[in-house]
Image: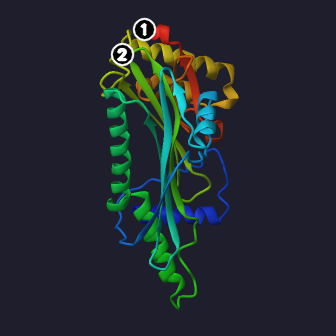
Amino acid sequence: MKKFACFALTAALLLAGCGGTDGDNAAQSQTETGSAAQESTAQESTGQTEQEGTQTEGTQTESTEAASANGASIKAGDYSYHVESLEKEWTTDNGTLACTVKLAYPVFEGDTEGEKNINAFFKEWADDKLDYYENDKDSIVNIALQYQTELETEQNSTQEDSTLPPVPPSEEDFSVGGVTVRGSVISVFMESYSYEGGAHGMPGRANYLFDKTTGKETTLASLISISEEELNQKVRGLFQEQVKGNTEGFFEDAEETLNNKTDFIDNYYFSEDGVVFYATPYEIAPYAAGYTEVTVPFEELGL
């Protein structure tokens, strides 16, 4: 099925009152589609973008948002950084808002080689995101532009019965969840929220690890003192304890999903207490439960 058809189906479900049921998948599946070549308008600002969704943020994220809301410097160990943001919106030729994107990223305020290279990394990250939104026919922007343009065409035609229901503008927001310094690395935790029509959007997360001295990206696997198999066993056991202690809060097949899961190392971020591993919404629990998290102390991982 074409991406555009999926978008239209989502819109129809939204209009029909597709509420926040547990089985409702708001992350709209996207396959092939054509692109729309409409004009875009941009607005740049500094500060923190507002994060939405069902994320289970801790005090680290909350304090980061509070400090960056007014562009203030934020301390992370011996480092200081602030958050810069870019907001851009795309409209159809007739001026209908189709999609808004907000990109926030950290800017370190020191002049060390590591900080300069991390800043260059996130500047390129933002540039690459904008290039993707503009030029990839499968981006959330071009899908939304195509839908809103065809909706306008249909509404302006003599056709009595519209086959395309109206939907709110799409949006994608990225924010800085927090920066943690541990040993020889700087961890940057990023959060996101994407809405493409439907009952609700979907949250997202990513964590970036950098060598403090060089600013080059590194991996969690290269830093920990235990094997990935040992890590899987440790993290799986912590999740299973949660499931057994609250069976009604998880899907019936949650334990089976955990037993078959071998990529715990892919979903993590650093906190002040240790490495937080998480299961995404719908993975072992309903959307309303948000992220399911367990924390492994740094010392148990040799960090």
- The location of residue 53, given as percent across then percent down, is 61, 45
Taking 209 as reference, is 93 above or below it?
A: below
Q: Secondary structure at mark 1?
A: loop
Q: Amino acid at mark 2?
A: Leu
- The location of residue 28, given as percent across then percent down, is 49, 54
Closer to the camera, 181 or 109? 109
Residue plotted at (52% across, 17% down) = 274
Taking 128 as reference, is 239 above or below it?
A: above
- Could you tell me which quadrant the N terminus lies in? bottom left
**Identity of the residue furthest to the front in this view:** 111
Q: Which residue is label 1 attached to?
A: 302
Sooner in the amino-acid sequence: mark 1 or mark 2:
2
Closer to the camera, 99 or 176? 176
Residue 251 appears anywhere in the view: no
Residue plotted at (44% across, 33% down) = 109
Residue plotted at (36% across, 26% down) = 210
Label 2 Cα crowd, 10 Å radius (few <14 / some 14-19 / many 20+): few
Closer to the camera, 78 or 66? 78
Disc 1 to disc 2: CB gap under 8 Å:
yes
- The location of residue 290, given as percent across then percent down, is 61, 37
Left or right, residue 268 beside residue 115: right
Left or right, residue 197 beside residue 289: left
- Could you tell me which quadrant the C terminus lies in? top left
Q: Amino acid at mark 1?
A: Gly
Q: Which residue is label 2 attached to?
A: 223
- The location of residue 19, given as percent across then percent down, is 67, 54
